[in-house]
């Protein structure tokens, strides 16, 4: 008989349950993306999830690991998250490349689930952005914001997805537009004030919240993302520490600097709703594998993400800094876990380091 | 939404409780035997008494095969300080004394005294009842608690008398009566409070008298409110409500842990490496308090305890007073279990108890619960280990503030220095981390392994150091001997040479007797000169 060590009771939680809870939490955002970008979003989601799972299967097979791992949902989640960070206009081969990269280099080469330093989906996304900056910053005009391409038509979407804009007698410029963050960055560079730039863009906080502004698939609707985020918090799949400190740090920095000089620094609400902040805060930064383990470490991590996001957005070359911030903070996790630990019961002053 | 509010409240420490301890988990309770009136377990055909039923040194058997023993008669003499004697739990004949398996995860054996009951249940009346304990000195009462064989019935079975010390350096202000039964399935403490509230409060009063405490808190969780009312009534009946308070805490595991309970009630933490007494607190379990009452007021040694006999494989679970030494399978049979072979028997609760091999193991002082679980249920909780996804649920659940995932990783990789750096030895093995782990990692198992290995390494280090010192002192001794030998040899050589020189000089003198003064010079000068001359 095997010697069984206590405890002999279990909460019933599992990796699979955790992963599928996150997938469920992302469904509203995925549905909004389909509403905004029609079949194009559907094709992109299918491509990323399918390619991720297939790559995972091949990796598990080649590395002689248990094939059952495929069904723990982590590969499907990586694919889903990756798709939600991509612009609707990316061609199929980029989505495929990113999916393979996320699984092979982002996860399996580190040793598989649980061992990767970086969030696989985000690392693939960053590689795409650096390698293909044009395609990765060309945002489809959403269906309800004057789209020139009929993305609700399956045939058109399919042709566009596989053969590019020429196949549907369009040009990149005709079907794409700038995202609010990108537009603001360009205008600010030309000396236009924040309020002027936003009104030129016809930016609306309300639309940014419920979802009509151009951006990546999943960034469309803050509301849909918040639904998912609150669901995850309620299910205790994630803790509040990372998303709240992350968003609060960005908002606080933006608020303070906006007070100092409203012409140069965008307001807090704009920063919170624009770009991938909410997606990153609730779904990327909270990736258990690449974030700190302790509550106090998570707070430090969230703060770091927030600080870097705002700094990159405001002073960096890239209009969006959320994913870079998370990736950079991912590197810090081993250090955070080593130096920022919870206080152990019965120890009141600083622990003596061994 | 409600969950979220709860999460936020908990995070901001807005829970109704003023000093919640850190971490903890909410468990499914499975209290099948809640408020089931206690029953007396029938007499088995044979009783077995392992010579060690407490933390500390084992006892030495005082009886021989063929001796007749009485209920409450001392049959094992305590050895050393951290030890309490063992008593027979009924009258009968000692049939054999031999090594026998004990309830311990290692399945190790210890000398065990076997007694065949004669059915008369005659009582040894050598302990005189001391109902007027208030007029007795703490020293006298302490000796009574010791010879009655009382060890903590909450699970740790630490000899109780050791704690009951009136210390001038550390005066005890508050005695905590631990009525918190945080393990799932178990209801024995709850039931004992419902049935024996007066005895428990008297026991508490004795403890307060012994340590000179001015106040006491009876701690009860809100899943056993009826016990709180009964205890409150008992306190009022005995006119002790001025000094004894009944406090109800929100249910959370492991609140029954001594350190956690002290924190929950007083907001104070026991400093690392120290004892509750150092912050003026003493805690005792309700079962122990009742045993103290029986020992002092009734003159009864500890020979039985209330045991929760339950589990999902048991047709009729019960709370039973079981004599120590009763075989576990016999007890389970009384609750309708046909065979002990098809079930897993958990000794204690599911969170911290151990799984016993189905052999004739006796009920001992530590047996607060006996759970007959279906093998499938147990196997489901011991699911195959998956990779750690670093979710940190373990860290959130840990009442000690550790980071179990990193700790387990270091234990698993045998990086014990790192594990110690992550405070391995502050783990209380409550199992909250393993309970919540989505990857089913047996974290506590790794910690036990790590602790064992570190202890072994420390022992080996001490041994190596001792051997090194031994070998060094041997080398030193040998070198010294060698040097002494050489010194002797040198002296001998010198003497020899001196003698030779003297002889040579004499010879020279013989050849040249004319000059006397020269001989003297030669004897002082090195030898060669006269030799050359000769």
Image (tube, helix red, strand yellow):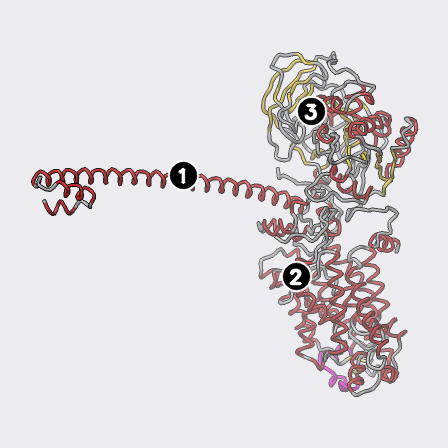
| Number of the front mark, 2 or 3 | 2
Residue beneath disc 2 = A335
Against B365, residue B278 (above or below) is: below
Q: Position of residue A246 (x, y in %)?
A: 78, 66
- Residue B5 is left or right of residue A7, and the answer is right
Give the side of residue B515 with respect to residue B230, left or right.
left
**Marked residue chain, label 2:** A
Residue B18 visible in the shown view: yes
Of the 4 image quadrants, the one containing the C terminus of chain B is: top left
Q: What chain does badge 1 belong to?
A: B
Residue B420, position in %: x, y? 62, 49
Name the residue nearer the viewer: A271 or B489. B489
The foreground one among B418 and A183 is B418
CA neighbours of label 2 inside 10 A, class few (<14), some (14 to 19), many (20+):
few
- Please rate how many residues cluster around mark 1, counting C-alpha atoms within 10 Å: few if below 14, some from 14 to 19, many from 20: few
Label placed on residue B327: 3
Q: Is residue B450 left or right of residue A237?
A: left
Q: Quadrant of residue B324?
A: top right
Mark 3 to mark 1: distance in Å?
54 Å
Q: Give the structural element (helix, strand or loop) at label 3.
A: loop
């Amino acid at each position: 008989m095997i010697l069984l060590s206590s405890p002999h009771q279990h909460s019933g939680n599992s990796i699979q349950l955790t992963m599928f809870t996150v997938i469920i939490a992302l469904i509203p955002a995925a549905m909004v993306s389909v509403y905004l970008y029609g079949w194009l979003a559907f094709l992109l989601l299918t491509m990323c999830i399918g390619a991720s799972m297939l790559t995972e299967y091949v990796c598990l097979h080649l590395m002689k690991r248990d094939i059952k791992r495929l069904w723990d949902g982590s590969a499907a989640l990586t694919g889903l998250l990756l798709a939600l960070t991509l612009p609707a206009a990316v061609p199929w081969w980029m989505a495929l490349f990113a999916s393979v990269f996320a699984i092979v280099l982002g996860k399996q080469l580190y040793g598989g689930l649980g061992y990767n330093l970086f969030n696989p989906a985000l690392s693939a996304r960053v590689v795409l952005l650096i390698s293909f900056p044009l395609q990765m910053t060309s945002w489809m005009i959403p269906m309800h914001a004057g789209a020139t391409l009929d993305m609700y038509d399956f045939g058109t979407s399919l042709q566009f997805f596989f053969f590019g804009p020429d196949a549907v007698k369009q040009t990149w410029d005709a079907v794409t537009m700038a995202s609010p963050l990108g537009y603001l960055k360009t205008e600010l560079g030309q000396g236009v004030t924040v309020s002027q730039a936003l009104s030129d863009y016809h930016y609306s906080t309300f639309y940014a919240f419920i979802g009509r502004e151009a951006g990546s698939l999943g960034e469309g609707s803050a509301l849909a993302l918040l639904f998912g985020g609150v669901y995850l918090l309620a299910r205790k799949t994630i803790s509040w520490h990372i998303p709240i400190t992350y968003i609060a740090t960005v908002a606080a920095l933006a608020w303070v600097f906006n007070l100092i000089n409203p012409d140069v620094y965008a307001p807090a609400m704009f920063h919170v709703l624009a770009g991938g902040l909410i997606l990153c805060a609730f779904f990327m930064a909270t990736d258990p594998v690449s974030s700190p383990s302790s509550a106090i470490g998570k707070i430090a991590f969230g703060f770091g993400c927030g600080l870097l996001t705002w700094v990159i957005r405001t002073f960096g070359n890239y209009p969006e800094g959320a994913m870079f911030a998370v990736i950079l903070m991912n590197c810090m996790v081993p250090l955070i876990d080593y130096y920022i630990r919870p206080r152990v019961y019965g120890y009141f002053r600083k622990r003596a380091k061994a | 939404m409600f969950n979220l509010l709860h999460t936020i409240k908990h995070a901001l420490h807005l829970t109704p409780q003023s000093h919640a301890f850190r971490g903890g988990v909410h468990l499914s309770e499975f209290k099948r035997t809640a408020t089931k009136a206690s029953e007396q377990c029938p007499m088995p055909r044979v009783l077995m008494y392992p010579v060690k039923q407490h933390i500390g040194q084992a006892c030495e058997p005082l009886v021989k095969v063929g001796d007749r023993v009485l209920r409450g008669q001392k049959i094992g003499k305590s050895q050393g300080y951290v030890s309490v004697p063992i008593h027979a739990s009924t009258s009968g004949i000692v049939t054999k004394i031999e090594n026998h398996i004990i309830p311990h995860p290692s399945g190790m054996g210890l000398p065990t005294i076997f007694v065949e009951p004669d059915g008369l249940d005659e009582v040894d009346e050598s302990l005189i009842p001391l109902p007027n304990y208030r007029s007795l000195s703490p020293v006298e009462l302490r000796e009574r608690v010791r010879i009655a064989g009382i060890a903590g019935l909450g699970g740790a079975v630490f000899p109780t008398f050791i704690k009951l010390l009136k210390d001038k350096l550390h005066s005890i202000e508050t005695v905590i009566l631990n009525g918190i039964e945080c393990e799932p399935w178990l209801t024995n403490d709850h039931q004992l409070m419902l049935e024996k509230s007066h005895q428990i409060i008297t026991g508490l009063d004795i403890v307060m008298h012994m340590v000179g405490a001015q106040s006491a808190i009876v701690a009860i969780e809100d899943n056993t409110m009826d016990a709180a009312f009964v205890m409150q009534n008992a306190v009022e009946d005995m006119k002790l409500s001025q000094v004894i308070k009944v406090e109800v805490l929100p249910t959370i595991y492991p609140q029954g842990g001594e350190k956690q309970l002290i924190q929950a009630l007083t907001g104070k933490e026991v400093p690392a490496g120290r004892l509750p007494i150092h912050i003026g607190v003493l805690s005792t379990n309700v079962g122990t308090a009742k045993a103290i009452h029986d020992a002092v007021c009734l003159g009864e040694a500890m020979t039985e305890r209330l045991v929760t006999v339950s589990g999902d494989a048991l047709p009729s679970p019960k709370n039973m007073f079981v004599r120590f030494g009763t075989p576990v399978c016999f007890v389970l049979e009384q609750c309708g279990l046909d065979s002990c072979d098809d079930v897993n028997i958990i000794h204690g609760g599911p969170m911290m108890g151990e799984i016993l091999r189905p052999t004739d193991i006796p009920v001992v002082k530590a047996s607060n619960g006996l759970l007959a679980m279906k093998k499938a249920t147990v196997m489901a909780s011991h699911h195959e280990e998956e990779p750690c996804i670093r979710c940190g649920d373990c860290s959130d659940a840990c009442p000690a503030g550790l980071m179990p995932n990193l700790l387990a990783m270091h234990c698993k990789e045998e990086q014990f220095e790192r594990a110690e750096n992550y405070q391995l030895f502050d783990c209380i093995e409550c199992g909250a981390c393993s309970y919540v782990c989505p990857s089913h990692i047996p974290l506590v198992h790794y910690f036990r392994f790590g602790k064992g290995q570190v202890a072994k390494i420390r022992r080996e280090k001490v041994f190596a150091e001792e051997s090194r010192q031994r070998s060094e002192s041997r080398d030193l001794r040998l070198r010294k001997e060698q040097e002494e030998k050489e010194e002797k040899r040198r002296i001998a050589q010198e003497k020899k040479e001196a003698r030779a020189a003297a002889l040579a000089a004499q010879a020279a003198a013989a050849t040249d007797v004319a000059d006397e003064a020269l001989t003297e010079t030669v004897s002082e000068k090195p030898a060669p000169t006269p030799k050359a001359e000769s």
